[in-house]
Image: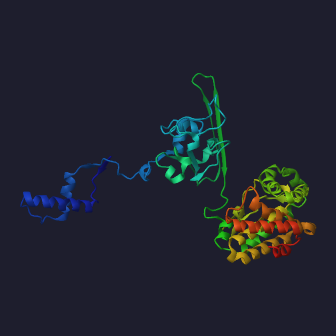
Amino acid sequence: MRIKALSGLRGWSQAFCLGASFILLFISSLSFAQDETDASEAYEELLEEVVVTGSRIKRRDFSSTSPITTITAEQFEFSGQPTLEEYLNQMPQLHPDYGRTSNNPGNGTAQLNLRGLGAGRTLVLLNGRRVAPSGVGSAVDVNNLPRSLIERVEIITGGASTVYGSDAIAGVINFITRQDFDGYGFDASYYVTAEGDSDIYDANFVYAMEAFSLGAESWKEHLLSGDLSPVFARRVGVALGLTIRNSWRSAELKERFGDRTAFDQLRDDPYYGEIARRHPSIAGAVDDWRDRDVPTALVHGDWSPKNILVDGERLIFIDYECAHFGDPTFDSAFILNHLLLKGVHRPALRNDFVRLARLAHTWTLSVLPPEALATFEADTMRHLSFLMLARIDGKSPVEYLADEAVRERVRQTALRLIARCPCTLEAALALL
């Protein structure tokens, strides 16, 4: 690397002249009354260039304790490779694993294997977050990553397990997506082998739009930190009530969202089915409740604080994977259960969480269609009793209630609610 000497390096010139003056004291009796400017000019005349060697020049790949290999989207594009894993498998750090051309064995996935230690020991991240494994084992199918949105890929092989744990023994591959993409994009390519015996088609389409700012936080984080704003509870209650009101007994929505397979797999069986298996004494009551067929409105299926984002004064509801046309009292009970359990977690704020539950429930009831009011609250309380037990003994217990004595107290409360069948929120609160 060559760096030209510039007249603006006055400080460096002075340092050089100062060092030279000590040498000249011993070899010459020349006067040092020479003007500083003349000395600088003489120095620049003498020094034509500086050649810097070594590895201390600041560079992105060496800005961390372990070297990072960075691959940009332009490199992917110019490589001519149709898939991400085919280009990455050409890197010296990677050992080719399952991919598009894998045969005997092959499982249809595209996996990355750093240093030949196995795809299961290679941690794959998307924007710094772990990607869920695909199928059996811990390997990730990179076919699921949005290639058209990839801005760069960072690979680290040294010392990654000290930061990320044993699943990063081989190293880490972090896919970074573009943050400035708004609109849609499409690219396509066609390849043919050198022997002309195989045609390869590749097409990528991506559509992106801004939904919320990067500073948005889940309502759950606000609640657990003690930020119990009644404004958000009221809005959550109103939003649920309006969702029910605007979809009430809609034949069109029932036809479009009548499939409740995802809800049964992710909510009904892990929650209600599991508590029936673990508590045989209430299995009959649970099964009778599950067998009801009351599809009256749209159901979110996970109407919880973690799926409600607070973006300034705006609330954004996400995660509709369990959405279907069914019993909307499930959503009503779901949010009440979360608020009441957080009151158990924060005993000093219990009364505040109870007030939030009352507020959200009151506003939901206030905007429901009149024909829904007859049984809505009683059905909500029945769901609440089962859900409270499910968040203790179901397959998805709440993570913040870790103390077994507290869990047992909630368990007994839920069993009491199941036995007593309260018809109103106030009656249920009296049994807590």
Q: Quadrant of residue 274?
A: bottom right
* x, y percent for residue 62: 42, 50
Q: Quadrant of residue 306?
A: bottom right
* x, y percent for residue 81: 57, 35
User: Please, which colouring scheme is shown?
Assistant: rainbow
Please identify the quadrant where the C terminus is shown.
bottom right
> Tag count in the figure?
0
Residue 172 visible in the displayed image: no
Question: Is 30 situated left or right of 35 in this image?
Answer: left
- Extreme left residue here? 29
Vertical position of residue 100 compared to residue 423: above or below? above
Vertical position of residue 397 compared to residue 207: above or below? below
**Of 213 and 99, the residue lying toward us:** 99
Residue depicted at x 84% and y 58%: 298
Residue depicted at x 51% and y 41%: 75
Q: Quadrant of residue 216?
A: bottom right
Residue 360 visible in the displayed image: yes
* x, y percent for residue 318: 72, 59
Question: Is 160 situated left or right of 371 in this image?
Answer: left
Question: Is 246 situated left or right of 81 in this image?
Answer: right
